[in-house]
Amino acid sequence: MSSSEAESLVIQDLQRHLSQSTNDSTTVALPVAAIKSLLDVIERTTANTMMGLEFELKEASKTMLQFANSPLNSVTLGGRSHIALASGCELFLKYITRCFLELPDFDSCKDQILQRGQRFSDISLAARDRIGKVGKQFIQPGSTVLTHGMSSVVSKLLIEAARDTHFEIIILEGRPDASGAKAAADLYAKEGIPTTVVLDLAMAHVMERVDQVIVGAEGVVENGGIINKIGTYSLAIAAKELGKPFYVAAESFKFARLYPLNQSDLPTLGVGMEDYLNFVDTACWMSTGGLIGKAPSTSDGDSESSSVPGLVTLPKEVKVENSLCDYTPAKYITLLFTDLGVLTPSAVSDELIRLYQ
């Protein structure tokens, strides 16, 4: 099999696993889909040495990372960044390396890797359930929870809590992809949870009405901080200023061996600068009476800004920057709800050592 054919199969596997749903009809986490794809590589490998198999797995991981980091694939990945995928692949490779050291015979080692890998995948899939059980204990009856984005693990936690406790949700609309509005419509409203969507810029304005903030994470870094959807850092600062607890719900496979000190230390994430600029079809935005974007083109290539009411068309001299994620330092985080239990930010480095040792 040529390298291009192998790369194509890996991407096909990744897309197939991402299109599947879990038992509770939520999407499969990107790192879990990547781990399942690596298991598929092991299933069809023609390598007959541990070194050869390890090389194939590293190449497959590299292929998936390149795919995840391409702006063209943002829709397939649902706007998710490659950070969690990278940590999931790295953790899995570390996991099977231990097997190489324990079992010198290649065939028995390969069988053991498949068994352990499937078990690892199953444990990862069950992580959201454990986090839901842990985190729902922090939501009191009659409270108001402020959240941001469309995190599967946060929605699992809130829906789990709503089965036993009456509370309200305030969710930021979630520009540039309206993820908060989508979560309100597709998840919380259907579960009968009282939900209010507010402008992203209203986060400080509504903070005095809430009892706690719960967000997800694209990655949990070594110093206990998180990388998450743009606006999370601002939300954490507002929560700290008004004395509201700021909780993070994240699976342990999102623990990444990164140590950012500021925003400029973040790796390049997913979609490019202007790719999310022109979401003119989002009703949530239209209600604000104005949009920023590019005017749609007519058949002859000319812009026709009049066809989109309220559209502000920026001239080419004006630069556009649409950052997808930001870094929130550990000092703003109260606790992390994980499948390893409830952790303080300072405990993250210890858990990373245990995971990768």
Image: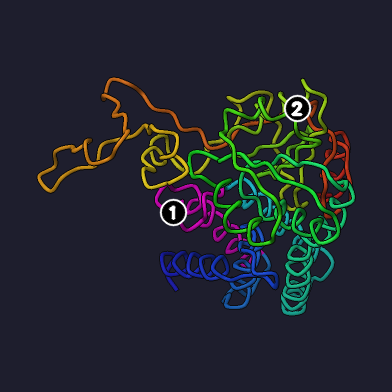
Give the image location of residue 71, x and y in percent. Answer: 42, 46
- Looking at the rendered structure, the number of numbered marks drawn on it comes to 2
- Which residue position holds label 1? 73
Comes first in the chain, label 1 or label 2: 1
Identified at 54% across, 65% down, the residue is: 14
* Residue 286: quarter of image: top left
**Residue 73 lies in magenta, yes or no?**
yes
Q: Is residue 177 left or right of residue 343?
A: left
* Badge 2: residue crowd in 10 Å (few <14, some 14–19, many ≥20): some
The structure residue drawn at horizontal position 87% and vertical position 33%, both measured from the top left corner, is 346
In the rendered view, would you say 242 is above or below 184?
above
Q: Kindly report the secondary structure that dominates the magenta region of the rendered protein.
A: helix
Residue 290 placement, left or right of 193: left
Check disc 1 and report its element: helix, strand or loop. Answer: helix
Asked if the magenta segment contains residue 251, the reply would be: no
- Name the kind of residue labelled 1 in the image: Asn
Residue 208 got which mark?
Answer: 2
Q: Quadrant of residue 171?
A: top right
Q: Is residue 282 above or below residue 203?
A: below
Residue 113 position, x and y percent, is: 74, 71
Find the magenta span and give its range.
Answer: 51-80
Q: Percent from the top left, x then y, of residue 227?
A: 66, 37
Determine whether the residue tagged by mark 2 lies in a helix, strand or loop: loop
Q: Is residue 127 left or right of residue 291?
A: right
Report the quarter where the N terminus lies.
Answer: bottom left
Amino acid marked by disc 2: Glu
Image coordinates of residue 232 in percent, x first then y, are 65, 33
Camera-side residue: 104 or 327? 327
